[in-house]
Image (spheres, grey):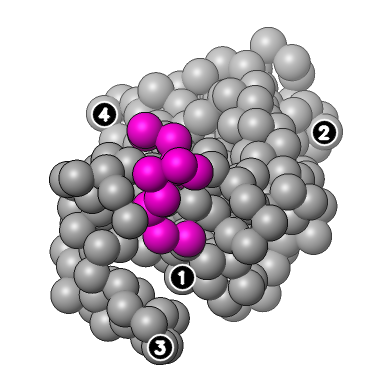
């Protein structure tokens, strides 16, 4: 759930994270305001910093400033000032903080990046989201049928029903791709991404069966995932 939007996927493609810590960085970047686009994205692309060096959470600011020698109290004060988006509102006070950071040789790119931040996420929240997403990903890898069955049982909608019932024999992958290209609703597009991935992994929907189908849940079978009775009006084969 944390990494299923096109925006976050693009960041994953651009940064290629390899550690949980980097995933937490990405979570913080996307939940904050003015942290990535027109800010640290350019720094990463220009190889000025690595993903691990980005300012992604409030904790990153305070711990970095303390590491550079600024007192714990002053580091916390600066962090609070930035995370509340006060930089542009209280410019005189900000210049006082800039002078302190200059005295401790904080890089200019770091200060300029802080100036652009509108809001920044606490690391504990980002960590919680990533842990939850990683658990879901584990099931997706090791129990794919159960994952997809659960996903569609939870995210079932009339719009999704219409698409599923229109799938025909043949190249289902291309059919899903074509339908996705005609859809503007981002949530439905995400559902189709999951469906596309499911078929690419060799898992398919099985037709409604009055004796095998559950009334509302997508059920796991040896040959694939059985569609529920609500997919059809009559509830029969």
Q: Crowding near pointer 2: few (<14 within 10 Å), some, many (20+)?
A: few
* Relative to 107, 185 lies left or right: left
Sooner in the amino-acid sequence: mark 2 or mark 1: 2
The residue pinned by badge 1 equals 196
Q: Residues within 10 Å of mark 3 (few under 14, many from 20)?
A: few
* Local secondary structure at mark 2: helix
- Give x and y (percent) for residue 162: 19, 58
The residue tagged 4 is 89
Residue 25 percent coordinates (x, y): 64, 45
Mark positioned earlier in the residue sequence (4 or 1): 4
- Asked whether the residues under the numbered discs 2 and 1 touch, taking CB atoms below 8 Å apart as contact, a structural biologist would say no
The quarter of the picture where residue 119 lies is: top left
- Does 49 lie within the magenta span? no
Mark 3 lies on residue: 170
Q: Quadrant of residue 184?
A: bottom left
- Foreground mark, 2 or 1, reads 1
Of helix, strand and loop, which one carries label 3?
Answer: loop
Residue 40 in sight in this render: no
Find disc 2 in the rendering and name its residue.
67
User: As drawn, is 35 to the left or to the right of 67?
Assistant: left
Image quarter where the C terminus lies is bottom left
Q: How many marks?
A: 4
Tell me the residue at 74%/15% (across/down): 72
Residue 115's disc is none
Tell me the residue at 80%/37% (across/down).
68
Q: Closer to the observer: label 4 or label 1? A: 1
Q: Nearer the viewer, residue 140 or 5?
A: 140
> Which segment is the magenta one?
206-218
Q: Tell me if 86 is positioned left or right of 173 in this view.
A: left
* Residue visible at 46% across and 22% down in the picture: 81
Separation of marks 2 and 4 at Cα, in angstroms: 27 Å
């Amino acid at each position: 759930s944390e990494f299923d939007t096109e925006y976050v996927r693009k960041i994953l493609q651009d940064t290629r994270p390899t550690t949980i810590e980097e995933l937490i960085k990405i979570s913080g970047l996307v939940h904050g305001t003015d942290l990535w686009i027109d800010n640290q994205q350019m720094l990463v692309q220009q190889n000025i910093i690595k993903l691990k060096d980005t300012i992604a959470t409030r904790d990153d600011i305070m711990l970095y400033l303390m590491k550079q020698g600024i007192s714990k109290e002053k580091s916390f004060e600066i962090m609070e000032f930035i995370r509340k988006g006060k930089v542009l509102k209280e410019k005189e006070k900000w210049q006082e903080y800039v002078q302190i950071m200059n005295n401790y040789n904080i890089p200019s790119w770091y200060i300029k990046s802080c100036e652009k931040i509108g809001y920044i996420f606490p690391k504990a929240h980002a960590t919680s989201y990533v842990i939850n997403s990683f658990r879901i990903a584990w099931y997706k890898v090791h129990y794919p049928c159960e994952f997809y069955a659960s996903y569609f049982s939870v995210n079932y909608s009339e719009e999704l029903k219409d698409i599923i019932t229109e799938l025909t024999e043949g190249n289902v992958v291309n059919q899903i791709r074509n339908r996705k290209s005609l859809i503007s609703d981002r949530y439905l597009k995400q559902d189709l991404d999951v469906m596309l991935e499911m078929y690419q992994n060799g898992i398919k929907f099985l037709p409604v069966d009055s004796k095998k189908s559950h009334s509302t849940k997508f059920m796991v079978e040896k040959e694939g995932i059985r569609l529920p009775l609500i997919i059809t009006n009559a509830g029969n084969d």
